[in-house]
Amino acid sequence: MIVKQAFILAAGRGERMRPLTDSLPKPLVKVAGISMLDRVIQKVSAIAKIEKIVVNAYYLSEMIETHLKGLNSSKIIFSKETEKLETGGGLLQAMQFFNPNEPILLINSDVVWQDENNEVLDKIINAFDINEDSILLGLKPKNEFLGYYARGDFNFQNGKLNKPEIYDSLSHVFVGIQIIHPKILQNCPKPPFSMNYFYNNLKNVKGVELSGKFFHVGDIPSIALTEQYF
């Protein structure tokens, strides 16, 4: 599968990283000397077929816009949000920059991972079937997502996702990397709405277990935990 367009979600407030994020948007928080947003942009830019990288922002958006201009990349397009749209609404607004007939690589701006030869993004791109898939989520076993201590997001077995109504613990975590086909936006709600709106119907959602080492950078202590590996 060839994916030519990417969307980096960078509009969040980063509440759990306060007071650090009182004056700095979470995507610009540095881990081992490099901002989380730059780490994601570097990984996406390494994919030769990617022609455009759209980055949205709402909270302290001027700081992110200035930072992106400083990167001086002709591939990067800034999508400014003047009201809180949430992740799904942010994607809907950014569709003005995308080809609606081609899949989009979506990545949360606070995803931090290590791999070799960009194998993580190569795997999810190669696993997406444009004729069969609407959404493909990148997953890790919960016990392999360093710094993550919550219940998990899905059970994942034999290529199938499942989330029972009553559960104590789930096997896998969605790590913030996915591929979607824009057709999912047909008949979607008006903003603000979350991408979770689409995940609730697992009939249209598939998963793929990713390689590499992933870090859950959700609060200030987790930064130091993650930096031990860099």
Image (spheres, rainbow, N blue to C red):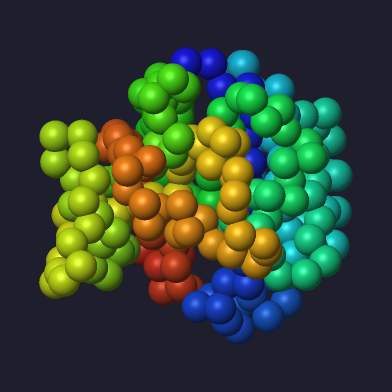
Q: Is residue 147 visible?
A: yes
* Count of numbered badges drawn on the protein: 0
Residue 74, given in percent of the width and then of the height, sits at 83, 28
Residue drawn where x is 61% and y is 24% of the image: 102
Can you name the residue that lies furthest to the front here? 187
Horizontal side of 182 relative to 157 (left or right) equals: right
Residue drawn where x is 56% and y is 78% of the image: 15
Of residues 65 and 173, the one drawn nearer to the viewer in this rendering = 173
Residue 19, given in percent of the width and then of the height, sits at 60, 83
Horizontal side of 98 relative to 227 (left or right) equals: right
36 relative to 122, above or below: below
Of residues 66 and 122, the one drawn nearer to the viewer in this rendering = 122
Residue drawn where x is 24% and y is 45% of the image: 161
Residue 230, given in percent of the width and then of the height, sits at 42, 47
Horizontal side of 68 relative to 134 (left or right) equals: right
Horizontal side of 15 relative to 83 (left or right) equals: left
* Residue 143 quadrant: bottom left
Residue drawn where x is 85% and y is 54% of the image: 66
1 relative to 208, above or below: above
Residue 200, given in percent of the width and then of the height, sits at 38, 57
Q: Is residue 122 visible?
A: no
154 relative to 61, above or below: above
